[in-house]
Every structure is written in structure tokens, then in C-alpha cells.
Image: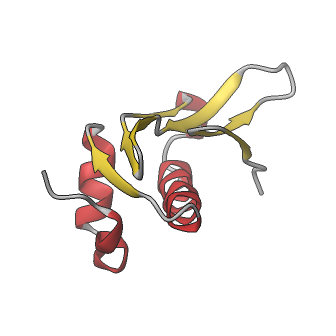
Amino acid sequence: MMEFQKSAGRIFALGEDGKVLAEVTFPTVKEGLVDIDHTFVDPSLRGQGVAGKLLRAAAQEIRSQGQKAKLTCSYAVTWFENHPEEQDLVRKE
């Protein structure tokens, strides 16, 4: 199981060499609103559901902070469309 690390507006996983293997970024746009703007998974991990786990972790983090998210990352848009139980997080522009 891959361990995700958290920093402000970012959830990520590093390889043993310190290289970023997976990350999702969601910087704060304004009070109460973040922008899920980037999802990355290293080619070596593709097809293992890592991106979905990143988005799930981001959704939990954003919800725990009482924030909403706008989606400018195309993967995030698709992921939220496929997970209606998380739709309450999405700020409709």
C-alpha cells in the first residue's frame, strides 16, 4: 500500500529515491475554496487506481477543512462525475 504524504494544498507519494511518484494539488483560491488543478501519476504506477486514491484522499482533506473545490484538472472533473457521493464538495461556477 502506497503511503501518501500531505502538505498544504498537496497530497503526494515519493519513491525511495525521493522522486514524486504521484500527486494531486489543490491550492487555495480564496477563503473556503480550493482548485484541484493537477493530478500526476508516474507511468510505472498507471493502471493501479493510484489517481483515484489521490482524489479520494484530496476529497477527504478538503471536506475535513470545510472547503469546496473547483476543478480545473481534467482527471478530477471525470473522477467527480463518476463519484456522485463526493459532488457536494464541488463548487459550481
Q: Is residue 64 left or right of residue 55?
A: right
> Residue 64: x, y in percent?
59, 67
Quadrant of res 22: top right
Give the residue drawn at x 24%, y 58%: 91
Q: Which one is in front, 58 or 41?
A: 58
Front residue (pair 29, 37): 29
Q: How is the image coloured?
A: secondary structure
Q: Residue furthest right?
A: 16
Residue 12 in the image, given as x and y percentages of width and height: 65, 38
Quadrant of the rendering where the N terminus is positioned: bottom right
Left or right: residue 70 compared with residue 92: right
Could you tell me residue 48's position as x and y percent? 55, 52
Q: How many marks on residues?
A: 0
Q: Residue at x 41, y 53 (%)?
A: 32
Give percent across and percent down for residue 81.
Answer: 22, 64
Query: Residue at horizontal 29%, vertical 71%?
Result: 87
Given residues 7 and 31, the one toward you in this image is: 31
